[in-house]
Amino acid sequence: MSDIETVPFRGMLIDGEIVPASDGATLDVENPTTEENIGAIPDATAEDVDRAVQAARRASRGWAATPWTKRASILRGYADLLEANTEELARLDALDGGLPVASMRADVASAASEIRYFAGIAGEMKGRTIPSGPDALTYTEFVPYPVVARIVPFNHPIKFVAAKISAALAAGATVVAKPGEQTSLSALRLAELVKDVFPAGVLNIVTGTGARAGAALSGHPDVPRVAFTGSVPTGARIMEAGAPAIKHVSLELGGKNPMIVFPDADPEKAAKASVAAMNLARSMGQSCGSSSRVFVHTDIKEAFLAALVKRVGELKVGDPLADDTDMGPIAFRGHYEKITSYVQKGVEEGATLLFGGARPGGLDKGFFIAPTVFSDVTMNMTVAREEIFGPVMSILDWDDYEKMIDQVNELPLGLTGNVWTNDINQALRTARRIESGYISINGTGKRPTGSPFGGFKTSGIGKESAVDELLSYGREQSVTITLA
């Protein structure tokens, strides 16, 4: 393991200044690899959040009036700055969240790509003209929301806080962003880096607990637009908080995502794809898009399981600061304990533990869990029904197509799905039957730039990472002129 490192205290970005919490409150930062305290972050108060919101409101008129080409140019410069600091930001996420540094470098690159994408389509905020007869002209204009709250989770720290503000900024809205309190170090470093990139108040970054800072931000009366990525229960609370003011709320929430493997699929290729789709080697399965329920036809079950166990056994678990590490520790103590309790439930309820389920040998400290595979899972088991958000895969048998489809769709979640078959007719028909917002066929869940992403059912409302998201940060205003 790497030597213990400490991280200098950094403040939040409010109105163009780097500041601590107004009452001096902080949250300790625990390195999940060493279980040692490595620093602290500000724990913003409701007053701090209000300062950020008011700064954003003051800046909103000028930012909305800035030509979209100028906003796009600023965003491209922001992406360049992000890439120029890749190594430092990736290393902070490895220290803070246990995420493999090589994957975090890729996250920075992905964030920069998304920023440039939204810069490139910023001109799509167009109006329309409507036939109004010979004596009138009716047209519409895009009007950005004055303030957008962008609240993101802990699992992809720099990627989410850096990229998920870009659509709103491109649209001409100002932003108050809040990262997950468990992994905020890279967001605070980002605050220092971008302090002078945007006009004061256009981008504000606050840190702290969801109960204190997050609730104050999502419920603030001067924040008409809230975009949240995270858990279903928190998303429900945000909707409730926004109801009195009829806030525009978009939610990208959890998933217990199915992968369906047909008997004509190559079991080895499908097994390798299931490991990639589970995001084990990128985020230890801490991803809402992970394919954690794998429905394998009984004809190829044994071959699939053999290939799966072989592949997960090849993953290297260890120091996230090492370039050859595939999996680091779980992001924080409470989540580690939650995941291990799910593993215990799987054993108690009768699933067969094929691989993992415990701390890997040679790792005496840190929140490490080996990649874990359960077979003989049935839909009445907890591991098949609840989002674990960790490196736990559940393998379910099937030989009756209609029964399998019913099991795929019986949960209230519906974020992603994956189908593996060589029969294109079967693939397309099955994709239409899966009640999820994003479907992969013979893939691993990777999404091309610009493809809309968002869930069905309790997995969310709205679409991200596409022009749909850009347009969601404004409203269409109609104007009719009566001609003299």
Image: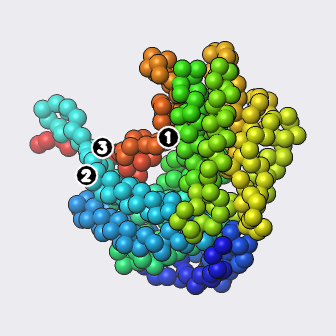
Q: Say whether residue 32 is visible.
A: yes
Q: Which residue is mark 2?
A: 123
In the foreground, 86 or 235: 86
Q: Which residue is mark 1?
A: 445
Up-down relation of residue 95 to residue 164 (above or below): below
Q: Say whether residue 166 is visible.
A: no
User: Could you say which quadrant of the image residue 11 lies in?
Assistant: bottom right
Residue type highlighted by circle 3 = Ser
Say whether residue 212 is left or right of residue 170. right
Q: x, y (%) of residue 408?
A: 64, 27
Nearer to us of marks 1 and 2 is 1
Disc 1 crowd, CA 10 A, few/some/many (<14, 14-19, 20+): many
Q: Earlier in the sequence, mark 3 or mark 1?
A: 1
- Secondary structure of the residue carrying tag 2 is helix
- Secondary structure of the residue carrying tag 3 is strand
Residue shown at the point (25%, 44%) measured from the top left: 127
In the foreground, 128 or 75: 75
Alpha carbons under labels 2 and 3: distance apart: 19 Å
Confirm or deny contact between disc 1 and disc 2 (CB under 8 A). no
Q: Which residue is mark 3?
A: 478
Residue shown at the point (85%, 34%) measured from the top left: 350
Up-down relation of residue 405 to residue 105 (above or below): above
Say whether residue 484 is left or right of residue 155. left
Quadrant including the C terminus: top left
Say whether residue 205 is left or right of residue 169. right
Residue type highlighted by circle 2 = Gly
Residue shown at the point (62%, 50%) measured from the top left: 314
